Image (tube, rainbow, N blue to C red):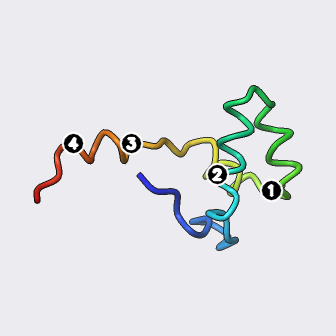
Amino acid sequence: MIIPIRCFSCGKPIAQDWEEYSERTLKGENPDKVMDSLGYDRYCCRRMFISHTEIIDEIMHYRRY
């Protein structure tokens, strides 16, 4: 759905870097290097980026007006 604002484990804010991470990985950059450059060295925060999937576009088909 929407990336959480903070890491579930440590509480570090992560949502502000999702767009940059997504764009850079779609361009073909290595996700490890992108997270290193963004300053995410804890494995819990890295897990939040790696395991997140954008399914909001699929769910919007089922909304009611």
Q: CA distance from mark 2 to mark 4?
A: 23 Å
The secondary element bearing badge 1 is classed as loop
Q: CA distance from mark 3 to mark 4?
A: 11 Å
Q: Amino acid at mark 4?
A: His
In the foreground, 32 or 62: 62
* Relative to 50, 38 lies left or right: right
Mark sitting earlier along the chain (1/4): 1
Mark sitting earlier along the chain (3/4): 3
Residue assigned mark 1: 40
Q: Residues within 10 Å of mark 3 (few under 14, many from 20)?
A: few
* Relative to 63, 54 lies left or right: right
Residue assigned mark 2: 19
Residue assigned mark 4: 61
In the foreground, 46 or 1: 1
Q: Residue at x 86, y 39 (%)?
A: 33
Do the residues under discs 2 and 4 have CB atoms within 8 angstroms? Answer: no
